[in-house]
Image (cartoon, coloured by chain):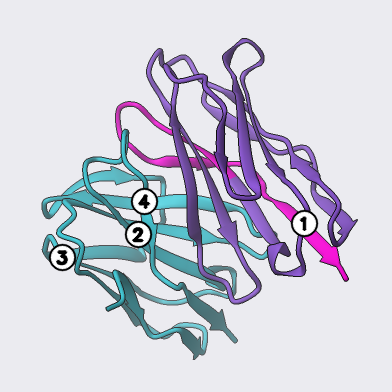
Chain colours: A cyan, B purple
Amino acid sequence: DTAVSQTPKYLVTQMGNDKSIKCEQNLGHDTMYWYKQDSKKFLKIMFSYNNKELIINETVPNRFSPKSPDKAHLNLHINSLELGDSAVYFCASSQDRGQFSEAFFGQGTRLTVV
Amino acid sequence: AQKVTQAQTEISVVEKEDVTLDCVYETRDTTYYLFWYKQPPSGELVFLIRRNSFDEQNEISGRYSWNFQKSTSSFNFTITASQVVDSAVYFCALSDGNTGKLIFGQGTTLQVKP
């Protein structure tokens, strides 16, 4: 069983489109995250939810909107996609708010905007 | 401000050599956690180790060992008798004590040649 699963793994889309990435964790964790990895491999947090409550919103454009229907799911919706949104997006989860326990990552979603 | 620096961008070794990956961090938190993650060519992020700021004992797991030195704010990672399968990007990370977000270093790309 995959602990943190994201779909799709690859996403190619045109500028201006709206797309969603889904994430589910079956670890029973309370906190979920979205991280972005750019072309230079740099990883940076975007959002964090704890028990469906947004706790981190790290200066991400309003075009990005996370949605957590329950604590096992955290989806990422992106409006009006731009070329600069091309990156690998990782979902992750951790047992607490992340201060003490390790985060488990999904396999990543490679988004290419053309 | 919290920061993680991995000064080595790329390292290339020949199989069976020992290699050390450096990590230096900055934080004002008195309690914090440090992590290492591995990102193989397949792209997923694999958790390797977590260390809390009160535990300065070195850790060994098979061919992997970690040296945490609070006095120099370093958390270095050594691979003994490297193997081709160790080829990956390795990330050092620090957790924010309030939000739990991970602050990643820039990553070190390790290439182990046969």
**Which element type, helix, strand or loop, lies under badge 2?**
strand
Q: Name the residue under label 1.
A: B82
Q: Which mark is first along the chain, 2 or 3?
A: 3
Q: Name the residue under label 3.
A: A72
**Residue B100 located within the stretch drawn in magenta:** yes
- The reply, left or right, for residue B75 in relation to residue A6 is right
Q: Are marks 2 and 4 on the same chain?
A: yes
Numbered range of the magenta stretch: B92-114
Crowding at dot 4, Cα within 10 Å, few <14 / some 14-19 / many 20+, comes out as: many
Residue at (16%, 51%) from the top-left corner?
A30
Q: In which quarter of the image is residue B13?
A: bottom right
**Which element type, helix, strand or loop, lies under badge 3?**
loop
- Give the x, y percent position of residue B90: 64, 52
Q: Distance between the residues labelled 2 and 4?
A: 6 Å
| Chain letter for mark 1 | B
The amino acid on which the numbered mark 3 sits, given as a three-letter code, is Ala
Query: Which labelled disc corresponds to residue A92?
Result: 2
Residue at (70%, 69%) from the top-left corner?
B85
Of residues B15 and B112, the one drawn nearer to the viewer in this rendering: B15
Q: Mark 3–mark 2 contact, CB under 8 Å?
A: no
Q: Which mark is first along the chain, 3 or 4?
A: 3
Q: Mark 2–mark 1 contact, CB under 8 Å?
A: no
Q: Name the residue under label 4.
A: A103
Of residues B54 and B34, the one drawn nearer to the viewer in this rendering: B54
